[in-house]
Amino acid sequence: MDSKKEAIKALAREAALMPQEEMVEVGKKHQQLTIGIPRETSFQERRVALVPDAVGLLVSHGHEVLIETNAGENASFTDKEYSEVGARIVYDTKEIFEANIVFKVAPPSLEEVKMMPGKQCLFSALQITLQPVESLQMMMSKKITAVAWDYIQDDSGIYPIVRAMGEIAGNTAVLIAGEYLSNASGGLGLMFGGISGVKPIEVVILGAGTVGEFATRASLGLGASVKLFDNSIYKLRRIQYDLGHRLWTSTLQPNLLGKALESADVVIGALRAPYGRTPCVVTDAMVSKMKSGAVIVDISIDQGGCFETSRMSNHDDPVYREHDVIHYCVPNVASRVSRTASYALSNVFAPILVKMGDRGGITGVIKNDTGMRSGVYIYNGTLTNDIIGEAFGLPYKDLNLLIRAL
């Protein structure tokens, strides 16, 4: 055995003495990016993909950033703020969509895709239930690489942008409920929370994901009494562990839920479905037994809502009454606080773009970053998302196989 080890060592020494190929340092394949940020045209979408600070960072790395005029207006950012950090203000929408990287918040419309010449990279949200098949087919024919920012994962497997928007929605839901409990908005004149000697309001939260977690944190911070429902024992246990104290929790049992709703002052719907419609767990009969003047905030409305009485409203006309219960069912709650939400988006987007420049473009990133790869649904014109393919009857291929072939 020892003789074998000595023989191996001798071979290793001999190999080390053999002439070696010269090792030349390989420089980074840095690529200057041209990034187009259009003004959002989707109904009541007030966020912007990059804030001025993020634009300044990208410009300092040698990239060109084109901002459509007034793109940041609804998030309280002026053209002057963008131009002062090195962005070029563009007055022609078509020029924005001719950039080699187009960054949007909302999914692209068919008209916007038509303006793209092709062989570009598009970042936007992906809403499978609203995505027109014509837009997908046109992006495929134009050899576009499309990335859904809401499906990008970080190193720990978390969806960072979805979590950030969930944190905003959870905190904002509590502020909205407090607003509609007050006399100023026609409510019962209750303060969200409680003070010494006065019974705190009761809050029921449906869903123990990110939205439910931050709605729970905000409610407890204001002094409210909280009851949290979810069918995942793991999620309920995790929230209790993270909060550091015991919390009233339950699975979604109809009898227990119905009794909790009868005494609740505020109910926040924060259930999510991986794909398709959110489960409707609160019936019309349950709502009819709630207190007169109670407030429902259905954050799940963009997936259909978890209350049978929910119907979509908007930021201009946000509430209605059903069984004398106030309903707030506005999708895209993050646009209510668009400046904060835009900063949250930029915190994730800017490092991605810097990495793309350092690695020579989108292909260099997705070859080495599995988290980014999870967000790609069209690669160089080839559909790579099986769910979209099966939903629309389109051919698709595995992205990992396409990447290995490069």
Image: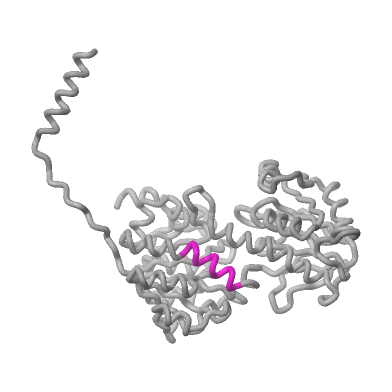
Give the left or right position of residue 324, taking residue 315 as reference.
right
Residue 195 horizontal/vertical position (percent): 85, 61
The residue nearer to you, when weighing 228 against 284, is 228
Q: What are the residue bounds of the magenta stretch?
A: 338-349
Residue 301 in view in this figure: yes
- The part of the image, by quadrant, that contains residue 57 is bottom left
Residue 325 horizontal/vertical position (percent): 85, 66
Residue 280 horizontal/vertical position (percent): 74, 55
Residue at 80%, 72% (x, y): give it: 320
Up-down relation of residue 400 to residue 353 (above or below)? above
Residue 89 horizontal/vertical position (percent): 42, 83
Judging from the image, the colouring scheme is one colour
Residue at 14%, 28% (x, y): give it: 13
Q: Which quarter of the image is occupied by the N terminus?
A: top left
Up-down relation of residue 109 to residue 152 (above or below)? below
Residue at 43%, 69% (x, y): give it: 138
Magenta segment main secondary structure: helix
Up-down relation of residue 394 to residue 97 (above or below)? above
Q: Residue furthest left?
A: 19
Residue at 56%, 73% (x, y): give it: 47
Is residue 348 rendered magenta in the image?
yes
